[in-house]
Image (spheres, coloured by chain):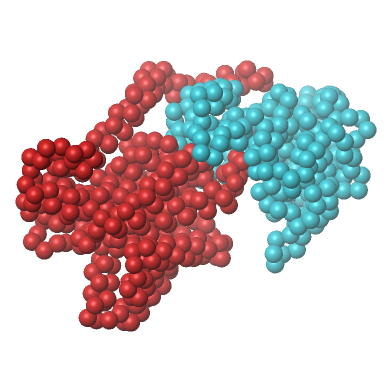
Chain colours: A red, B cyan
């Protein structure tokens, strides 16, 4: 049969799709093209609104307009129309905390999405891979020796890198690269790090560092200070920029190692950059807020449901939604009850059932 | 024997007469080679050699079918040529350049690889998947440009699967996955298209359609290397056949001279007959099931 006939045969095989494409496809594609910038803009606006709302809400309510004025005053001096108390609450207390929530949420969400592409596995995240708990061990050792935030950050990074390397090594040793084995490897590493954490707790001084470590492992933004943000902020921003630049490479990596290599991707170098950036994002989060679960797993899934799996579109949305999710969690953590609720408790309570719903919806793809 | 004449015509078109049979001992390398493998050996740790001292070359526009039984090491050899595996010894030349001196990007511009199985983790659309074939031409920090999408759409159109353009790859049938994967290799604009067991996991109709597509690609000037365990494929496709035996030796030649009843019977461990009839354009393989 001639090729033209073959083409005709293939065309008739897919006649139904052709018809639906002719009727709906074109419009749908156009809608999608128009829809993405709108979705991106909506996500950015939502992030800004939640950011201001988060600063505005607390023991004393500060109006939206006043919050914006106080923030603007930090950039460009304007006549003061607010009380000193309001200024102090916004700049001194709520801004560092909300900024930290935004940075950590965006960072963890992006780290999760990147790991998911890298490992060709939508079921992984910084916590499932053991990166968060590895980073926690590294950071806890630094806290144990009463080190400065920079050293806590370095400790978290080393712990995170060691954990992810170990998790990635186990499937290679057992020569099984399935989704299940990688998740099981994460459980093995998680078990190991949890034991190491217990040893660190045993060694910690019950009067001082033990309480610090215990409170910190539950995850909280209550003690975040502006000087810590000035340390982690630029690192998180740099990692976000690098991973966003690699967004298309992440698409190719998500096809698997062999295919990506056959398409001309330098696997070793690209993987190293993605692992370092994703682990740094996790380490930054862990070093100032402890271990916060679920964000890196749930948010990329929600983003993928909105934009599809193409990382070019998905990653920017995941960054915004991660920030929004974490700011809302922090807001709830400090307003739901008189005593502050650890943030990881809330991300777990909300994230776990939410993920169950996502699993139900995507069960075909997951299988 | 009309088919034999046809095969010979195709053979003459692409292969210089001086190289009737290339094999381990009788290899000829020249400037027409797109691929030249010199004394390749490969062994997995804790197992014997998969193949040893294998040498052969493939010219531009030629079809080479790597034939062998299950587990003979056909895919391993293919992966070595595509630089996805590193051979224990020997050297591979792509368009005259040693792969040792080539970047992965340079290799990807020569070889478009169609894997045996696709396990998609994410539901990319066919368009998004095929445009990934343009990766060797896209910078590390860049994304596909408009012209890359145009080329991807042209490749999809060439296969005649425009109707699948917006469909998720996870929802495709086995045959459609194979077509989409070949479209990606076309979008890759490589000189060679390598297909690892392209008909494995396909039903009878899709097997025939895939073989037809491979033949057409060859007629369009692509150099094709494919692996198969079905001896009908090299007979249908023409070109040359390389028989890889379990001991690791490779013999290369024309299907009509190399695929004799004796060799096939010995290769598959059962009596196989080649039936040639004028009403059928090619020899047909027959084996007794009683």
**Where's residue A90, x and y in %?**
15, 49
A50 or A183: which is nearer to us? A50
Name the residue rendered at 40%, 19% in the picture.
A26
Residue B166 placement: quadrant: top left
Q: From the image, which quarter does the N terminus of chain A lie in?
A: top right
Q: Is residue A253 left or right of residue B221?
A: left
Q: Is residue B40 above or below residue A212?
A: above
Name the residue rendered at 33%, 61% in the picture.
A286
**Where's residue B236, x and y in %?**
74, 32
Whether residue A124 is visible, yes or no, is: no
**Total number of numbered discs in the rendering:** 0
**Where's residue B243, x and y in %?**
80, 45
Q: Is residue A160 above or below residue B143?
A: below
Whether residue A142 is visible, yes or no, is: yes
B162 or B208: which is nearer to us? B162
Q: Is residue B109 left or right of residue B201?
A: right
Name the residue rendered at 13%, 52% in the picture.
A88
Residue A144 placement: quadrant: bottom left
Q: Is residue A126 above or below residue B68?
A: below
B164 or A201: which is nearer to us? A201
Name the residue rendered at 69%, 47% in the picture.
B83
Q: Is residue B67 left or right of residue A281?
A: right
Q: Is residue A301 above or below residue A198?
A: above
**Where's residue B284, x and y in %?**
77, 35
């Amino acid at each position: 049969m001639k090729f033209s006939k073959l083409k005709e045969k293939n065309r008739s095989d897919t006649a139904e799709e052709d018809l639906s494409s002719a009727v709906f496809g074109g419009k749908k594609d156009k809608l999608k093209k128009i829809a993405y910038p709108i979705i991106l803009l909506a996500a950015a606006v939502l992030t800004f609104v939640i950011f201001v709302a988060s600063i505005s809400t607390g023991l004393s309510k500060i109006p939206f307009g006043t919050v914006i004025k106080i923030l603007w005053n930090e950039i460009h001096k304007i006549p003061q129309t607010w009380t000193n108390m309001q200024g102090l609450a916004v700049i001194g207390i709520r801004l560092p905390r909300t900024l930290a929530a935004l940075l950590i949420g965006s960072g963890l969400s992006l780290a999760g999405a990147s790991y998911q592409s890298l490992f060709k596995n939508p079921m992984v995240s910084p916590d499932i891979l053991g990166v968060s708990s590895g980073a926690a061990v590294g950071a806890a050792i630094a806290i144990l020796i009463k080190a400065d935030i920079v050293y806590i950050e370095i400790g978290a990074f080393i712990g995170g890198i060691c954990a992810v390397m170990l998790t990635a090594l186990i499937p290679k040793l057992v020569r099984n690269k399935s989704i299940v084995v990688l998740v099981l490897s994460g459980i093995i590493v998680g078990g190991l790090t949890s034991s190491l954490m217990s040893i660190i707790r045993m060694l910690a001084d019950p009067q001082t560092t033990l309480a610090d470590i215990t409170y910190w492992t539950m995850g909280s933004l209550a003690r975040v200070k502006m000087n810590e943000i000035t340390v982690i902020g630029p690192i998180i921003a740099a990692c976000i920029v690098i991973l966003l630049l690699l967004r298309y490479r992440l698409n190719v990596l998500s096809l698997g190692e062999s295919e990506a290599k056959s398409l001309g991707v330098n696997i070793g170098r690209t993987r190293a950059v993605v692992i370092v950036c994703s682990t740094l994002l996790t380490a930054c989060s862990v070093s100032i807020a402890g271990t916060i679960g679920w964000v890196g797993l749930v948010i990329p899934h929600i983003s993928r449901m909105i934009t599809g799996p193409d990382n070019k579109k998905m990653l920017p949305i995941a960054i915004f939604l991660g920030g929004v999710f974490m700011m809302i969690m922090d807001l709830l953590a400090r307003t739901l009850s008189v005593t502050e609720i650890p943030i990881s408790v809330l991300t777990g309570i909300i994230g776990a059932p939410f993920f169950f719903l996502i699993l139900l919806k995507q069960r075909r793809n997951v299988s | 024997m009309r088919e034999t004449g046809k095969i010979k015509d195709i053979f003459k078109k692409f292969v210089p007469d001086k190289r009737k049979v290339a094999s381990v001992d009788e290899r000829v390398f020249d400037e027409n080679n797109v691929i030249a493998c010199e004394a390749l050996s490969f062994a997995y740790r804790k197992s014997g050699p998969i193949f040893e001292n294998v040498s052969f070359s493939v010219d531009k526009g030629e079809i080479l079918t790597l034939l062998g039984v299950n587990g003979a090491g056909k895919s391993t050899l293919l992966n070595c040529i595509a630089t996805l595996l590193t051979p224990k010894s020997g050297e591979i030349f792509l368009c005259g350049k040693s792969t040792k001196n080539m970047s992965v990007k340079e290799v990807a511009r020569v070889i478009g690889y169609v894997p045996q199985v696709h396990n998609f983790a994410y539901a990319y659309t066919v368009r998004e998947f095929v445009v990934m074939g343009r990766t060797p031409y896209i910078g590390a920090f860049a994304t596909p440009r408009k012209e890359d999408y145009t080329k991807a759409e042209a490749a999809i159109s060439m296969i005649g699967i425009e109707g699948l353009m917006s469909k998720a790859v996870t929802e495709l049938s086995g045959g459609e996955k194979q077509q989409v994967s070949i479209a990606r290799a076309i979008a890759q604009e490589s000189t060679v298209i390598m297909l690892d067991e392209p008909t494995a996991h396909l039903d009878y109709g899709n097997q025939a359609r895939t073989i037809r597509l491979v033949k057409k690609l060859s007629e369009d000037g692509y150099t094709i290397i494919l692996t198969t365990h079905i001896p009908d494929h090299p007979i249908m496709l023409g070109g040359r056949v390389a028989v890889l035996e379990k001991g690791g030796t490779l013999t290369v030649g024309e299907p009509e001279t190399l695929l004799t009843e004796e060799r096939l019977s010995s290769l598959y461990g059962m009596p196989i007959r080649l039936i040639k009839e004028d009403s059928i354009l090619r020899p047909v393989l027959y084996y007794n099931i009683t």
